[in-house]
Image (cartoon, rainbow, N blue to C red):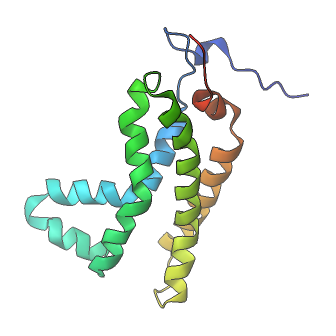
Amino acid sequence: MKSTEIHPADYDAQGRVRLPFLFWCVLLLQARTWVLFVMAAASRGQGDTLLNLFYPDHDAFWLGLLPGVPAVVAFLCSGRRHAIPRLWRALRWLLILAQIALLFWQPVLWWYGEPLTGLGVALVVADIVALLWLLTNPRLRACFAHQDD
């Protein structure tokens, strides 16, 4: 039988479970439009070209920022999660809901006429894997569980 206990090396100096590396990857996946927005802002002259390359429809860009909001909030709150435990516990479920929204977003775009591309299929597969990981990883659940000090 597989052990679901958390390894002692997975705890930080304060006795809290460290956030897994894949958590940060999932946050980047969810906040992909935010990452593109920051890259476009940092590239100054080519920012508009970069945004038009990935989001020719500007309305889709602004809508794409919405599912990334919980990921941005989780990133900003991760260092102070012990100070805001109720918000931190709620963020796990917000991240799961955002991941579900992202999972269904791409097929809806295909339904409304966006061409089927390898990048779109890869994003759907990555969204499925990320959703399953968010739902099933015991170490991540322990990170979001209430811990008495």
Q: Residue at x 57, y 66 (%)?
A: 103
Image: 61 above or below 17:
below
State the quadrant of the N terminus. top right
Q: Residue at x 52, y 32 (%)?
A: 86
Q: Position of residue 3 (x, y in %)?
A: 82, 24
Q: Residue at x 30, y 82 (%)?
A: 57
State the residue lying farthest toward the bottom.
113
State the residue lying farthest toward the right.
1
Q: Quadrant of residue 92?
A: top right
Image: 10 above or below 126:
above
Whether residue 122 is visible here, answered yes or no, is: yes
Q: Is residue 28 left or right of residue 97?
A: left
Whether residue 116 is visible here, answered yes or no, is: no
State the quadrant of the C terminus. top right
Q: Is residue 81 left or right of residue 4?
A: left
Q: Is residue 21 left or right of residue 62?
A: right
Q: Quadrant of residue 111?
A: bottom right
Q: Position of residue 134 (x, y in %)?
A: 63, 45
Work out whether residue 135 or residue 118 is closer to the camera in this orientation and state it.
135
Image: 31 above or below 92:
below
Q: Position of residue 96 (x, y in %)?
A: 59, 51
Q: Position of residue 30 (x, y in %)?
A: 46, 54
Q: Is residue 129 left or right of residue 57?
A: right
Work out whether residue 96 or residue 18 is closer to the camera in this orientation and state it.
96
Q: Residue at x 13, y 66 (%)?
A: 46
Q: Quadrant of residue 62?
A: bottom left
State the residue lying farthest toward the left.
45
Count of marks, rendered view = 0
